[in-house]
Amino acid sequence: MEEVVIRLNQKNHGAFYLMLDNEQVGEMVIGIENGILTAYHTEIHYTQEGKGLAKHLLDGMVAYAREHQLKVKPLCAYVHAQFKRHPEEYADIWLQE
């Protein structure tokens, strides 16, 4: 079963980690500052690619952003592509500059 966990340092930089059977199989590197969650990079372990696991990380990040009333700046190519494909789904959190 997949689980998404977040770990942040004192400067609110860190990542969401995708855990599968207690093993890390993916991560989304982020930073949070002034009410903005910046998504920098998403990566899934090569042995797990093509299984839709990046979407689990995206869903976890989106839930966190909504829960903490953050806007999301999608610098990550994957996150940006998903926001562009489904703008209505992410309109409430998407920081478009």
Image: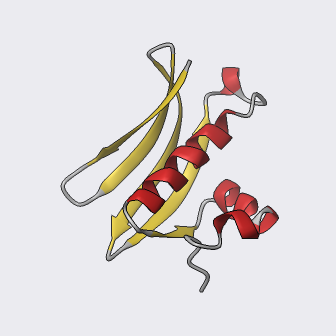
At a point 59% along the width and 86% down the height, the residue shown is 97
Q: How many marks?
A: 0
Q: Nearer the viewer, residue 26 or 64?
A: 64
Q: Is residue 61 left or right of residue 82?
A: left
- Does 46 appear above or below 70? above
Residue 7 at x, y percent in the picture: 32, 42
Q: Residue at x 74, y 69 (%)?
A: 88
Q: Position of residue 52 (x, y in %)?
A: 73, 34
Q: Name the outermost residue toward the bottom.
A: 97
Depicted 11 relative to depicted 59: above or below: below
Q: Residue at x 23, y 60 (%)?
A: 11
Q: Quadrant of the N terminus?
A: top right
Where does the image place residue 49, in percent across and percent down from the top left? Answer: 73, 29
Q: Residue furthest top?
A: 21
Q: Which quarter of the figure has residue 96?
A: bottom right
Q: Is residue 33 above or below residue 53?
A: below
Q: Position of residue 47 (x, y in %)?
A: 68, 20
View extreme (left): residue: 10
Using the image, determine if residue 31 lies above or below residue 43: below
Give the residue at x 73% y 58%: 82
Q: How are the colours assigned in the image?
A: secondary structure
